[in-house]
Every structure is written in C-alpha cells, then in structure tokens.
Image (tube, grey):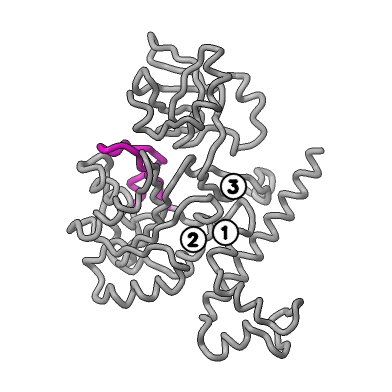
Amino acid sequence: MDLIKLGWNSTFATHHEPWRAKGLIPARVTREDKYTYTILSEHGEQSATLMGKFRYHAKSRGDYPAVGDWVSVRALPDENKALIAAVLPRRGTIMRRAVLAGGPAYGEGRAEEQVLAANVDTTFLVSGLDDNWNLRRIERYLAVAWDSGTNPVIVLNKADTCIDTEAVHAEVEGVAMGMPVICVSALTGVGVTKLRDCLQGVNPTGVFLGSSGVGKSTLINSLLGGKAMLTGAVRDGDSRGRHTTTHRELHQLPEGGVLIDTPGLREIQTWNDEEGTSRAFADINELTARCRFRNCRHDGEPGCGILAALEDGTLDPGRYKNYLRLNHENRKLAQRRGAQSRFKR
C-alpha cells in the first residue's frame, strides 16, 4: 500500500514519530461504522477498533477517528486487524454541530461536534438542478466549508435536466463570493473533467457534501473511472434521494489522491466560529462597514448601508435573512459551548 498516494506527507510523519518509536504504524481511516473502522496501512485494508486507553482519554465525539483521519495503530496482521492508539493532528476538517435526537434527557440541547471528514483539501458542495438546488442552502454549505479551512467548489449537477443552466449558474455565482461554480452532468459526463481540475496539489483529498439525491456518488464513480458505489434514482415529484449512501467512505483515485463520499445531509450547522459565515457573506460585511454609525442595528437608523442596499435591490432580502439566521445560530452555539466548558470545570 502506497501511503503517499493516500495523502501521507512529512507533516503527518512528524506527528507520528513518537508512536513509530513505540512500534506503531500509520494508517488512514477509510470507513467508520460506529466504533469499528476500516483502515488502509502498509498491511493493506484492515478492520480496526479503539484501544481502551484511547476511549478513556477521549473527551468528546470529535476526538474519535473519522473518515480521512490519519491514525497510529498497532497492527495485528495475522488477524487482519489493528488497534487505534491515536488520531494524528487534523487539517481541513469538515465539522458540524451533531444532530442529537431523543429529547433533553439524551442531550438534545447539548452542543457537540461531529467530524464529517478530516484532512480535506477541496470540498465539493453538490446541488441537483432537478428542483433540488437552493441558494440559501448553498450559502450555508459555503459557511461550513470556509469554517473547515478547505477550498469550496459549488457543483450544480444534473445539468441535463435544466432548461437554462446559464441563468442558474449566474444566480449561484452571485452568492459564491468568487468561488468556482461548475455545471455538470454525471449522466452525460459534461463538466466532470472540470471537477478533477479542482483537485489541486499532490495526492489531494476531496469530499462531496450535499443533500440526498443530488448525485454525489454518481459523480465520484465518474471520477474514479468505474462503479465504486451503489447509486439510486430519486423519487418522482420531489427529486428527493433514497439514501443509497448510508455511511462516509474514502475512495482512492487511480492517479493518486482520494475522494470521500458522504450520506445526504438533511441539515448542517457550523461549528468552529463565525469566520465561515463572515467569508460566505463578505458582501454584507462590506455593506455594514458603510453604515454611518459604528453600532448601527440596521433597523431604521439614518445612513445605514444595509437598508440602502435592500431598498435599491442590490441586496437580496432572502440572503440577508439567511445571514442573520446563521449569525444567530453562531451566537447560540457559542453560548452553549461556553456554558458546557464552565460546567466541566
């Protein structure tokens, strides 16, 4: 197994060095099934579980391995298994606030992170042009991608179903803040090579995010040059998917590098801080800077840059409302995390 083609580099090697001295080897997580993992190492593909010491020291859900993580493991080649001792420091981590169901007794109101993919270079934000695309959702995905420190690419799939792709492309470019917007058709192959060009760097890692039924798995199959994953048709009438992808999984590109497929996301909230929202709505922040008063509330004050833009039509009311909603979520999340931190002390 050539770990370099999986994205291994000198930075990860430095982080792994203390574990190498203890006889452990590096591996990359390719699949996560609760607390059982599939990894690739010098021994090939193996099943892996966590060492008891790792479980004991893990403080939150985000400390556990995720697809794309590099880990230090004790290999058991005779059993084709391994024990995970450590997760190496991440970069380019796609995180969201975990969706916790079951009511207050099960932590519904608790702020807890969920790592969707780790060590990512490029995040492909996929929407389907068969009545599935939504500007407000794209704005939210952009904020999450910027939070992660990855390079976002907006992908408008199923161009073969759209009557006027140029008009849609122009509309999405209006919220993309200079990021690439690519119209593709996984069915016909149009535009797929442009996605490959967005994977820059040596042996890069790309992740595909989007709601169910937008064609993430089909696009990845096209880039892999074969059929690596099951795909399914969307429902008639509402273009909703059938959740063919039920888990996150990493796939190797023939020329080097990897792609990570993810299940359809029903909802996604930012986790890290307000930087992602700020970058996704850079135009609104610029308008705010034009306000006459530094503490302007944008609620009737004279010389307000936001109100002037809303009145002359240069700022979409829906975009501004989404901006306010995301900032509100960020503040509430910061309050919950702060309260939990104080409680732990």
Q: Which residue is mark 1?
A: 276
How many angstroms separate mark 2 from mark 3 (CA)?
Answer: 23 Å
Range of magenta residues: 242-264
Q: Is residue 64 left or right of residue 186?
A: right
Q: Earlier in the sequence, mark 2 or mark 3?
A: 3
Across and down, in percent, residue 146 comes to 52, 56
What is the magenta segment's predominant secondary structure? loop
Query: Which residue occupies 30% across, 67% down?
Result: 130
Q: Amino acid at mark 1?
A: Gly
Query: Which residue occupies 35% across, 42% down?
Result: 259
How many angstroms separate mark 1 from mark 3 (CA)?
Answer: 23 Å
**Label 3: few (<14), some (14–19) or many (≥20) C-alpha neighbours in 10 Å:** some
Choose between 21 and 155: the one closer to the eye. Answer: 21
Query: Which residue occupies 74% across, 55% down?
Result: 335
Query: Which residue occupies 73% across, 80% down?
Result: 296
Q: Amino acid at mark 3?
A: Leu
- Residue furthest out toward the left: 188
Q: Are marks 1 and 2 in contact (CB under 8 Å)?
A: yes
- The quadrant in which residue 114 appears is top right
Q: Earlier in the sequence, mark 1 or mark 2?
A: 2
Q: Amino acid at mark 2?
A: Leu
275 magenta-colored? no
Q: Which residue is mark 3?
A: 100
Choose between 6 and 135: the one closer to the eye. Answer: 6
